Image (spheres, helix red, strand yellow):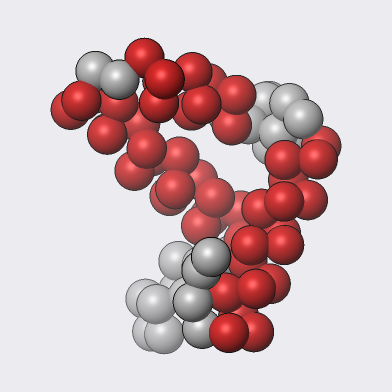
Amino acid sequence: MNAADNTMTVEQAYRAMLAFLQREVELTESSDLADLVSEYQLDADGKTRDPALWDEWLGAVDQTLRTGQAG
């Protein structure tokens, strides 16, 4: 993260999302959320287990950048 302008790379934002979701798993003990987080983890080379998932993430990032909001 660049402290001067509070920007993150796409990968840093993904890792932040994973950290946030992992904390929610710990707080809620939700097995469904735990399963989801497990599927979204990055492997040793920084790739998602399912390449389509990364493409979906990039699509969400692109949409957010274009519209200023997610979803």
Residue 69 versus residue 26: which sits nearer the camera?
69
The number of discs equals 0
Where is the N terminus found, in terms of image quarters? bottom left
Residue 50 is left or right of residue 27, and the answer is right
Q: Position of residue 51 (x, y in %)?
A: 81, 37
Q: Residue furthest left?
A: 27
Residue at horizontal 73 percent and vertical 26 percent from the top? 49
Q: Position of residue 19 (x, y in %)?
A: 38, 39
Q: Position of residue 37 (x, y in %)?
A: 48, 28
Q: Residue furthest right?
A: 51
Residue at horizontal 60 percent and vertical 24 percent from the top? 39
Residue at horizontal 71 percent and vertical 59 percent from the top? 58
Residue 13 is left or right of residue 33, and the answer is right
Q: Kindly tell me whether residue 45 is visible in this rendering.
A: no
Q: Kindly tell me whether residue 31 is visible in this rendering.
A: yes
Q: Judge whether 62 appears above or below 13 on screen.
A: below
Q: Judge whether 26 appears above or below 58 on screen.
A: above
Q: Quadrant of residue 32?
A: top left
Q: Position of residue 24 (x, y in %)?
A: 27, 34
Residue 53 versus residue 5: which sits nearer the camera?
53
Q: Judge whether 66 appears above or below 37 on screen.
A: below
Residue at horizontal 51 percent and vertical 69 percent from the top? 70
